[in-house]
Image (tube, coloured by chain):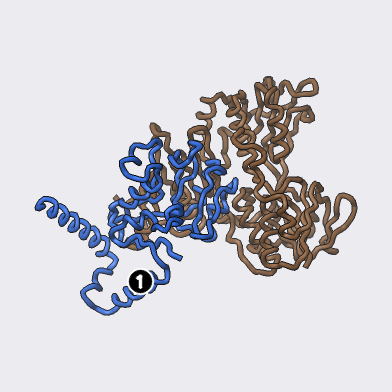
Chain colours: A brown, B blue
Amino acid sequence: MKYVIIGNGIAGTNALESIRRFDPEGEIKVYGDETLPPYCRPMISHLLEGVVGPERLPVRSRDFYDKHRADAMLGQRICAIDADQKQVELPTGKTVSYDRLLLATGADPRPVDAEGTDLENIFFMRTEAQVRGMVKRLPDVRRALVLGGGLVGFKAAYGLLRRNIAVTMLIGSGYPLSMQVDETAGKMIQAVLEERGLEVRTGVSVAAFEGNGRVREALLSDGNRVACDMAVIGKGVSPAGRFLPADKIDMETGILVNSRMETSCPDIYAAGDIAECLDIARGYYRVNAIWPEAVSQGRVAGMNMAGIPTDYRGSVSRNVIRIFDLDVMSGGTLDDRDMDDTCRTVVFEDRRRRIYRKLVLKDNILIGFVLVGKIDAGGILASQVQSRMPVMLSDSELASVDLNFATIYSHARYGGTTHTEDAS
Amino acid sequence: MKQVIVSPRRCVGCMQCVVACAVAHSRSGDLPGALAESPRPNPRIHVGAGIYHEGFPNRCRHCNPAPCMAACLPGAIYRESKTDSVLVNPDVCINCASCAMACPYGVIRYRPDPLIRSGNTVAIKCDNCVARQHKGLDTACTEACKTGALVFGELDAAMKRETERVARSMTPGPEAWALHPETEPLLAHKRAIVNMNHQEEGRSSS
């Protein structure tokens, strides 16, 4: 059996391990754009922050590919595949045939439509190499401009603030992390960042970057100018699947996969940030480009490729971040567009202690939550979203900062009734 | 291999395991010393209260596969094979709380700890008392537990005991009613009070 894995991120890496576990004989080839041994992509923000050095990023050893008897050809980006001939085309023009192919190419940062993006000190923040480039320039940087208030924009801004660099952030929506948290939590996050020197501007974009070789200033869409000696573009990512034959492999935002991680094309699988699969909380297909799901999807894809039928239950979007002394965890959906009249919202707020919790239930199943402060036991809620078990807890128990597994156990053992409203 | 076997319905919520755990994870190793330490030693076991205020010893299950291990960004969480324990390497942990999001039991905390020499806040969780186990000792929580809610033993033997207990409960006898789900936590609570009263009496008469 000949396996080809495109992508050496964590999805591809886990797939490789799965395949090797169940098929000791097969021939495995890995192609990847990045040349490092498998590393922890989310930790590039810690690298920017300065809490870890680059040596801490690898999550597998240098001899990982040898140990798994895989042929790794890194530093080359695959530009075409021929699904009929079951071949992958290399940049050199050479072709490599496969019996089973995994697409784990991840995603690429979305460029911005502005002039002067080729100036020095304008960065994307997606790879270790890009962040290493940023860190190298930090000694000369006083003011930074971050485009976008999503997860990447937020992490860029936070890392730079931690390095005592003044940051201006341009956000399209009204508050940061609008895809992850609700408005109340978003404003709490923004307030903490502003206390530490972040300047937020909403509803504006960059029309042009200016500078003599190196960025010095940005001209905004409202005519204002912002001085900056570094700019980070965090306007989201798009799944890296443009090279794929669209008539053979069904794509929406990402490549559509079933529970076996199979694409619409026989013997081609997809996993990780490029894959679009069932979102458990939302009940529809969605790309949830997060590390733990990439791990799971890679494992499941690898097992199926190696002939061990395994189903993936679907993904749940979730994130946990620490912003100075404020902790935030969110999972599932908090989006009004996902709500209907079977949904109810439970809120607990203690402004003085900077605690805020909002939970959304649909037909008494938890489909989303955001916790600000006291996040230690938040995994209990995340697993409720994943399991889709009807919630037996009362609203006040569910939203309590003292939520303990004891309550869930006790309801399951002694309760036997399902609460729809608070038992007072 | 011996392991910690939890029987939540036996827990009376006395919290002695919590204290014993914190002491076992202190530098001094005794209660007065532990109280004087800064930062304060952290218990790794958490006793919660159920809907009838019955106790529940919430402790790391050392799952296999462990979701926290899969979620750990820097690869700080690993399995120690000798005691089959899921452990955190504090020198690698970056306190990102990814494991908090992954743990369905909510048993991981993030605090400075007297055993963490760097002084950093890191993920603190049950380590199955590996240090004690390597010395041939039982885990601290099981040693402290008086009610049999936490027992250090062979799983097979515990399963057999439990099977026999269930079998006995099928035949009507004086013990059978105690298994009725509604009465049991109340009974456990009552027993605890009775026990406490006994102790009180013992103390005042002596």
Q: What type is the residue that disc 1 sits on?
A: Glu
Q: Is residue A375 above or below residue B194?
A: above
**Residue farthest to the front, as pictured:** B135
x, y (%) of residue A274? 70, 51
The local secondary structure at tag 1 comes to helix
In the drawing, does residue A100 fall left or right of residue A322? right
Q: Is residue A184 above or below residue A392?
A: above
x, y (%) of residue B56? 34, 56
**Residue farthest to the left, as pictured:** B205
x, y (%) of residue B51? 31, 55
In the drawing, does residue A295 fall left or right of residue B182? right
From the viewer's side, name the closer residue of A35 and A365.
A35
Q: Is residue B21 above or below residue B64?
A: above
From the viewer's side, name the closer residue of A301 and A59.
A59
Whether residue B106 is visible: no
From the viewer's side, name the closer residue of A161 and A390.
A161
Where is the N terminus of chain A found, in terms of image quarters?
bottom right
Whether residue A404 is visible: yes
Residue at the location (62% across, 66% down)? Answer: A310
Residue at the location (49% across, 45% down)? Answer: B123
x, y (%) of residue B116? 48, 41
Residue at the location (54% across, 45% down)? Answer: A335
In the drawing, does residue B76 fall left or right of residue B187? right
Q: Which residue is mark 1?
A: B162
In the drawing, does residue A368 fall left or right of residue A18? left
Q: Quadrant location of residue B165?
A: bottom left
Q: Chain of mark 1?
A: B
